[in-house]
Amino acid sequence: MSTALERGRALTQKLNPDLEKVLSDRYDDLLPEFSESLIEWAYGRHYARPGLDLKTRQLCTIAALTVLGGQTGPQLKINIEHTLAAGAGRTEIVEAIWQMAVYGGLPAAINGLNAAREVFEMRDGQAASTA
């Protein structure tokens, strides 16, 4: 049986292979082992659980971050990327964000849609530059 850290690392390899290094470079000097803790706890103990497929978990994450509001913009963008990597389409992402207008209000949904647009445009620009 694998450890939560091993499960978390395996999962993040699918979603964002550089995530642990990015987190480590950004935060481990302030809070040693932050990156490892996040990978173990969030991904290895929560995202890796049975009961929901990864795409559904990621759509739930987008919904939660949208409702929490504009201060979650950076995390929302990262999780939009992760949700695409988990197999969700752009329409599914936009609809999950739009559904949150009922619960978080129109400003939260608009902020979420703006984050999605930025991610989609960035990806489209990267695709165009490699073509």
Image: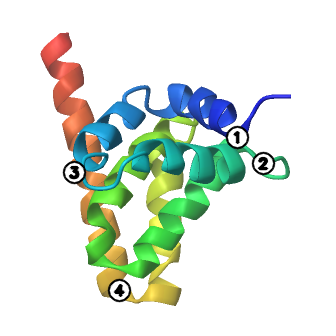
Mark 4 or mark 2, which is nearer the start of the sequence?
A: 2
User: What kind of residue is marked 1?
Assistant: Ala
Q: Residues within 10 Å of mark 3 (few under 14, many from 20)?
A: few
Mark 1 or mark 4, which is nearer the start of the sequence?
A: 1
Q: What residue does disc 2 label?
A: 49
Query: Residue 106 — which label?
Result: 4
Disc 2 to disc 3, C-alpha distance = 30 Å
Task: Name the spot of residue 106 as percent of width and height, x first.
Answer: 35, 86
Q: Is residue 78 above or below residue 105?
A: above
Query: Residue 118 — which label?
Result: 3
User: What kind of residue is marked 2?
Assistant: Arg
Q: What residue does disc 1 label?
A: 4
Q: Residues within 10 Å of mark 2 (few under 14, many from 20)?
A: few
Task: Name the spot of residue 35 as percent of width and height, x first.
Answer: 42, 44
Disc 4 to disc 3, C-alpha distance = 18 Å
Q: Are marks 4 and 1 in contact (CB under 8 Å)?
A: no
User: Which quarter shows the C terminus?
Assistant: top left
